[in-house]
Image (cartoon, rainbow, N blue to C red):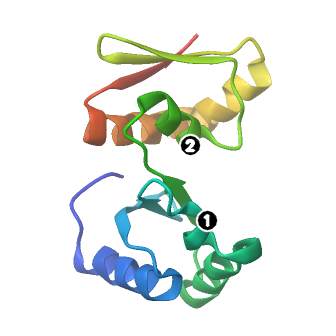
C-alpha cells in the first residue's frame, strides 16, 4: 500500500498537479482506489467547484480517486483520514492514537471489510507520524 513512488505514481502526481493546480504531497493505491495526499489548506483547490477537477481526473485515468488533506495536528489528520465518518473522540497517548466511538456502524466503516481501512490508516500514520491507530 504505502510504498516508494514508482514511475506510474509519479505520472499520476504530475497529472493531478496539472489538472488541479495543487502539488500532491503523496500518492498511493488503496486496493483499486488512487489516493492523493495534499497540503493543509489545498483541499478546496484540489477538488474544484462541486468536485469538478477530481471528476475530470477520474474520467481521464478510469480509477476511483480519494483526496486527503494532510495536517501536522494528528487529531485533525485522523479526522481527515476517516472522513466522512464523524467520531465522538480522537486522542493520542504515547505512540498510539485512539478513536472512541460507541456506534458500532461507524466503527465498522472505519475498520472496513477484513479491517482493510484500518490497515491503510495505520500504514499512513506510520509513514508520517510513526504512530498506530486503535479503536475503542
- Image position of 107 with respect to 98: above or below: below
Circle number at residue 71:
none
Q: CA distance from mark 2 to mark 1?
A: 13 Å
* Mark 1 nearby-residue class (10 Å; few <14, some 14–19, many ≥20): few
Describe residue 131's horizontal placement relative to residue 98 as left or right: left
Q: Quadrant of the C terminus?
A: top right
Task: Name the residue located 50 percent from the left edge and 53 percent from the top edge.
Answer: 69
Q: Is residue 64 visible in the rendered structure shown here? A: no
Describe residue 78's horizontal placement relative to residue 15 as left or right: right
Q: Toward the viewer: 34 or 54?
A: 54
* Badge 2 vs badge 1, beta-carbon distance below 8 Å: no
Task: Name the residue located 32 percent from the left edge and 51 percent from the top edge.
Answer: 2
The residue carrying mark 2 is 80
> Based on the displayed image, in which of its 4 quarters is residue 10 positioned?
bottom left
Query: Where is residue 121 drawn, in percent x and y?
Result: 45, 38
Describe residue 68's horizontal placement relative to residue 25 as left or right: right
The residue carrying mark 1 is 44
> Based on the displayed image, in which of its 4 quarters is residue 38 positioned?
bottom left
Q: Toward the viewer: 41 or 94?
A: 41
Q: Toward the viewer: 1 or 89?
A: 89
* Mark 2 nearby-residue class (10 Å; few <14, some 14–19, many ≥20): some
Task: Name the residue located 58 percent from the left edge and 75 percent from the top edge.
Answer: 63
Q: Secondary structure at mark 1?
A: helix
Q: Secondary structure at mark 2?
A: helix
- Image position of 60 with respect to 44: above or below: below
Q: Which comes sooner in the sequence, label 2 or label 1? A: 1
Query: Where is residue 104 drawn, in percent x and y?
Result: 76, 18
Describe residue 44's horizontal placement relative to residue 10 as left or right: right
Q: Is residue 102 visible in the rendered structure shown here? A: yes
Task: Name the residue located 49 percent from the left edge and 28 percent from the top edge.
Answer: 75
Query: Where is residue 28 drawn, in percent x and y?
Result: 38, 61
Query: Where is residue 86 drawn, in percent x and y?
Result: 72, 31
Amino acid at each position: 500500500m504505502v510504498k516508494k513512488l514508482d514511475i506510474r505514481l509519479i505520472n499520476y502526481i504530475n497529472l493531478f498537479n496539472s489538472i488541479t493546480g495543487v502539488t500532491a504531497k503523496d500518492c498511493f493505491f488503496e486496493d483499486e482506489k488512487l489516493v492523493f495526499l495534499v497540503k493543509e489548506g489545498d483541499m478546496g483547490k484540489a477538488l474544484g467547484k462541486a468536485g469538478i477537477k477530481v471528476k475530470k481526473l477520474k474520467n481521464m485515468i478510469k480509477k476511483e480517486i480519494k483526496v486527503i488533506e494532510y495536517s501536522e495536528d494528528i487529531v485533525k489528520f485522523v479526522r481527515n483520514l476517516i472522513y466522512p465518518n464523524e467520531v465522538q473522540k480522537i486522542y493520542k497517548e504515547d505512540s498510539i492514537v485512539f478513536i472512541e466511538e460507541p456506534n458500532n456502524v461507524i466503527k465498522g466503516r472505519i475498520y472496513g471489510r477484513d479491517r482493510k481501512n484500518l490497515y491503510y490508516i495505520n500504514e499512513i500514520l506510520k509513514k508520517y507520524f510513526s504512530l498506530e491507530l486503535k479503536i475503542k
